[in-house]
Image (cartoon, rainbow, N blue to C red):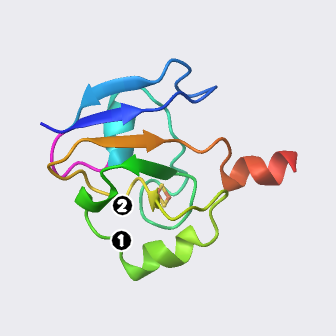
Amino acid sequence: MPTITVLPHPELCPEGSVFEAKIGESICDALLNQHIEIEHACEKSCACTTCHVLVRKGFGSLSAADEIEEDLLDQAWGLEADSRLSCQAKVGKEDITVEIPKYTINHAREHH
Ligand code: FES
């Protein structure tokens, strides 16, 4: 089974985490199963950007992003080349390393 390494996030996962995920499981579901409470404001229906993650390793092993995801990602806080919406990106055979951005668009609206 592929391993997901989560880099430390001050609120959601201060120590970081390493755990096994199922192939075909979305990164969002895998995180939630580990009680890493990533936001998922649209209930994983690819209609918000709050589940945005940066995939630091293993990006190419994930299921490909469709056009709707790509369009939405443009609105995500802190977009990078290895950004994905975690509710859409399904784990493949390779291990991946995930960074949860410091803010989501919800936070950005509240605090900035
Ligand atoms: S939870 Fe809304 S796009 Fe993933």
Residue 72, percent from left and from top: 55, 72
Task: Judge depth for marks 2 and 1 and give the one in front.
Answer: 1
Name the residue beneath numbered marker 1.
Answer: 65
Q: Position of residue 48 (x, y in %)?
A: 56, 63
Q: Return the residue nearer the eye: 18 or 33.
A: 18
- For the residues labelled 2 and 1, say whether their Cβ atoms are less than 8 Å apart: yes
Residue 43 in magenta stretch: no
Give the CA separation, mark 2 to mark 1: 7 Å
Residue at x 71%, y 51% (from the top left corner): 106
As drawn, 112 above or below 88: above
For the point 25% across and 64% down, which residue is it? 63
**Kind of residue sitting beneath label 2:** Gln
Image x and y of residue 67, in percent: 41, 82
Quick one: 71 or 110, which is closer to the camera? Answer: 71
The mark that comes first in sequence, 2 or 1, is 1
Q: Quadrant of residue 89?
A: bottom left
Quick one: quadrant of the N terminus?
A: top left
Per the image, label 1 sits on a secondary structure element best described as: loop
Furthest toward the bottom, the residue is 67
User: Which residues are drawn in magenta?
Assistant: 22-26
Q: Does the magenta stretch mainly form a helix, a strand or a loop? A: loop
Examine the rendered structure and indicate whether residue 106 appears above or below residue 60.
Answer: above
Q: Is residue 24 magenta?
A: yes
The residue at which mark 2 appears reads as: 88
Ligand 1 lies under 8 Å from the Cβ of mark 2: yes
Residue 51 % position (x, y): 51, 51
Residue neighbourhood size for the residue with mark 2, other residues' Cα within 10 Å, grouped as few (<14), some (14–19), many (≥20): many
